[in-house]
Image (cartoon, rainbow, N blue to C red):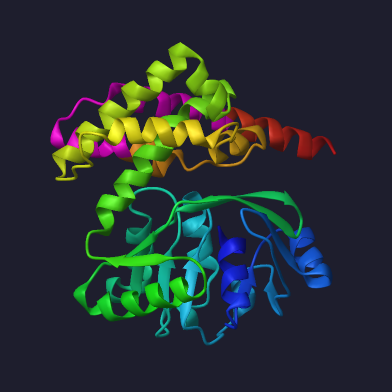
Amino acid sequence: VGAILSAHLLQAGHIVLMVDAWKEHLERIRVNGLRITGREEMAVRPRHLFESVGALGDATLDYVFVCTKACALDSLLNEMSSEIKSSPAVFVSFQNGIDTEQILAEQIGRRRVLRGVVSYAGVLLDSGEVRETFFDPPNYIGWLENDGEGACRELADLLSASGLLTEATADIQKFVWRKAILNSCTMSIAAITGMNIQEMINFPPTAGLVELLLNESIAVAAAYGFDFGAEFVEQVKKFNKRAGPHRPSMLVDIEKGRKTENFFLMHRIADYAERRGVPAPIHRALAVLIDALEARSMQVRNYHRAAE
């Protein structure tokens, strides 16, 4: 997400400070530039590359796009300088999951935090190269406090002018939930089974489980006033069919022994269900199984690292 965003902003002439902890990725970008392939072809040369947010120091920023996994938010904020956190910069959660913007708001303040819902996706092919797999415009950005509406609308215009059509909305939580539901029904099954989306929807038992998860999460969302329409389940099925052999990021995280976004997706939906007394046993059960897989995969990764 961050690389595609950066490429569009750079190509539009904006100054972008890129932060990525993967040193090889940054070094390749420094030498050869950043390349976007797939849905569109772009080649840009970022001039400002940093290996950590701490290295930004007290840089003067207009916007801070947070494109990390939701599970990295706490460590990112702890590493960031107090000067940036207390500056006039507007922070934008460009992440998956429910309530990521609330974590930012706790340290930054609600007036300076916006929430984004990203409608494009990419796959890291190699250091310095990202394949943009799809863009189903628009993206959405919403404000947490009325004072943030002006900055939100300005940013939506800026992104749209950079080639990423974006709509400012006062109803951002509806879109947050919509995407969380879309992600959760396939990410969770992929993480547990190892299937890609095409395999999942072509195997009747897992295709049925996708629909059960959809029905559970739609009921939870309805308890909070979010109505996606009578055709939503069919829309999700069509979206999943178009996804083809896509491997959800939660599966990749499990395979690589990394922390997943399970807490902000499956567990979050189950938590919200409990608050309103809506049954969501499948979400909770799969969330716990993913917790176990995550703990096991991280243990194996650490074992191999220690053995090297």
Point out residue 172 in the picture as x, y percentages from the top left corner: 28, 58
- Left or right: 267 in relation to 135: left
Residue 114 or 105: which is nearer the viewer? 114
Q: Residue furthest bottom?
A: 60
Point out residue 65 in the picture as x, y percentages from the top left corner: 49, 68
Query: In the rendered view, would you say 195 is above or below 165?
Result: above
Point out residue 233 in the picture as x, y percentages from the top left corner: 30, 31
Q: What are the residue bounds of the magenta stretch?
A: 269-295
The quarter of the rendered structure image containing the C terminus is top right
Residue 290 painted magenta: yes
Q: Magenta region, mostly helix, strand or loop?
A: helix
Point out residue 25 in the picture as x, y percentages from the top left corner: 75, 60
Query: In the rendered view, would you say 65 is above or below 139?
Result: below
At 53% across and 29% down in the image, what residue appears?
Answer: 197
At 52% across and 60% down in the image, what residue appears?
Answer: 67
At 75% across and 65% down in the image, what residue appears?
Answer: 26
- Left or right: 256 in relation to 279: right
Residue 68 or 291: which is nearer the viewer? 68
Residue 204 or 69: which is nearer the viewer? 204
Query: In the rendered view, would you say 179 is above or below 152?
Result: above
Which of the 4 image quadrants contains residue 54?
bottom right
Which of the 4 image quadrants contains residue 20?
bottom right
The quarter of the rendered structure image containing the N terminus is bottom right
Residue 190 painted magenta: no
Query: In the rendered view, would you say 48 is above or below 134?
Result: below
